[in-house]
Image (spheres, rainbow, N blue to C red):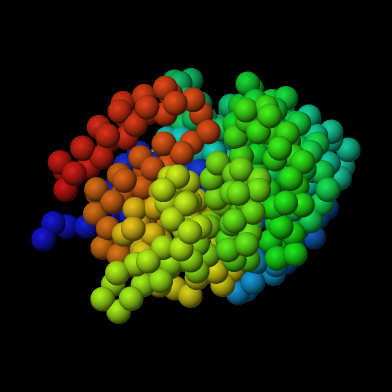
């Protein structure tokens, strides 16, 4: 039997990340610095202790309680300087993990409490990504696209959708809605999604994480989502018999037939209670059934994770090899919101040669 990929090897392989929250990925030391600057009160000012605090607090078993931890990250991301720094460090950290293409999301409306306009927020984050993406020779080490998120319990989605369209040629590649899912169905923001469709713009919707099939159904069939954030509960529409044969309901079949990408985030799902364990995580079944599965971090700080770490965890639980990891990576690149020719160039020019080399070395 061939040896399975190790964490160190996985770090060196080219990776693609589609679901990562800017305000869920700060370095704990940066939060401490920024909190001191702006007078935000933290549970502890020791960076190592703070990192542990986030993980423990996020390990709550409910999406609503998990989301409470964001008050300490959003709270320190209220000035242009803070946003530039956080975005630059995000790009650096992802590049250091071997991520070559990332779509990073955040909700501009949450960063205006000290007077920044929505446009100023977007421009600060774009500037941070530009700075953080550059290597020592000035050439980009990573390409970062931005997704603008609207909070589903608020009523600003149309404004944020317009913002995403306004900045579409300047680094914003799509739109999303996030926040507590139960009680806030996707159709609450139907006007924003219809507007984006008329504008030929791309969007994903957090659905099937803290709520089940009706949320996924609305996201796809009412709102026209290009991708699903999480989408784990799609397994509620799949029955597996004792001999392992799977029967797909109409919605699950539609998602698979249409190749709708699932932005799966295994560790995050354990923390919010969306999945009981990695071994029992729906990603195992969905991968086996050839859904268009992608592997993501969601919130690197709250989960103490990285793309490489998520891959390594799956290798451990399911015995995935380099072919599986390449398959997840190609799936993600195919599902990115950048133009087709650019995706193809990255698949053929970076991903396939990168994994060929990893396999050859193994
Ligand atoms: O997994 C998730 N499900 C739903 N909402 C989330 C998740 N992770 C983060 N956020 C929410 O998205 C906002 C913008 O980035 C965050 O502030 C958080 O409230
Ligand atoms: Zn998320």
> Which residue is located at x 88 percent, y 38 percent?
115
Relative side of 281 to 203, left or right: left
**Res 279 → quadrant:** bottom left
Point 55% across, 50% down: residue: 228
Q: Is residue 83 above or below residue 120?
A: below
Q: Residue at x 29, y 69 (%)?
A: 245
Nearest the eye: 45 or 296? 296
Question: In the image, is 298 to the left or to the right of 140?
Answer: right
Q: Which of 169 and 188 lies nearest the eye of the viewer? A: 188
Nearer the observer, 241 or 180: 241
Q: Residue 129: percent from the left, percent from the top? A: 59, 32
> Which x, y percent locates residue 347?
34, 31
As rendered, which of 19 and 134 lies closer to the eye?
A: 19
Give x and y (percent) for residue 308: 39, 51
- What residue lies at 43% left-to-right and 45% top-to-bottom? 259
Q: Residue pushed farthest right? A: 115
Residue 119: in sight, yes or no?
yes
């Amino acid at each position: 039997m061939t040896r399975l990929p190790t964490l160190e090897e996985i770090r060196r392989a080219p990776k693609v990340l589609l679901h990562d929250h800017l305000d869920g990925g700060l370095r704990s030391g940066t939060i401490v610095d920024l909190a001191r600057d702006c007078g935000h009160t933290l549970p502890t000012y020791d960076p190592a202790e703070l990192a542990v605090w986030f993980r423990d607090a996020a390990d709550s078993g409910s999406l609503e309680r998990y989301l409470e931890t964001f008050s300490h990250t959003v709270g320190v991301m209220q000035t242009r300087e803070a946003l530039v720094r956080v975005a630059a460090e995000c790009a650096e950290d992802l590049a250091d993990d071997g991520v070559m293409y990332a779509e990073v999301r955040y909700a501009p409306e949450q960063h205006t409490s000290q007077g920044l306009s929505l446009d100023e927020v977007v421009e600060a984050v774009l500037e941070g990504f530009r700075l953080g993406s550059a290597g020592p020779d000035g050439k980009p080490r990573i390409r970062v696209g931005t997704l603008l998120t609207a909070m589903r319990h608020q009523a600003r989605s149309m404004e944020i959708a317009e913002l995403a369209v306004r900045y579409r040629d300047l680094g914003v590649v799509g739109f999303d809605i996030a926040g507590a899912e139960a009680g806030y169905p996707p159709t609450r923001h139907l006007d924003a999604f219809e507007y984006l469709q008329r504008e030929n713009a791309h969007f994903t919707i957090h659905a099937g994480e803290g709520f089940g099939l009706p949320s996924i159904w609305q996201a796809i069939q009412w709102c026209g989502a290009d991708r699903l954030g999480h989408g784990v509960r799609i397994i509620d529409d799949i029955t597996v018999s004792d001999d392992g044969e799977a029967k797909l309901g109409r919605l699950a079949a539609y998602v698979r037939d249409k190749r709708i990408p699932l932005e799966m985030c295994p560790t995050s799902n354990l923390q919010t209670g969306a999945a009981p364990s990695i071994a029992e995580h729906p990603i195992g079944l969905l991968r086996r059934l050839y859904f268009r599965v992608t592997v993501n971090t969601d919130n690197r700080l709250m989960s103490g994770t990285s793309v490489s770490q998520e891959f390594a965890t799956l290798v451990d639980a399911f015995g995935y090899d380099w072919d599986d990891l390449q398959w997840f990576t190609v799936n993600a690149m195919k599902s990115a919101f950048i133009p087709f020719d650019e995706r193809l160039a990255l698949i053929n020019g970076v991903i396939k040669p990168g994994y060929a080399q990893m396999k050859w070395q193994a």
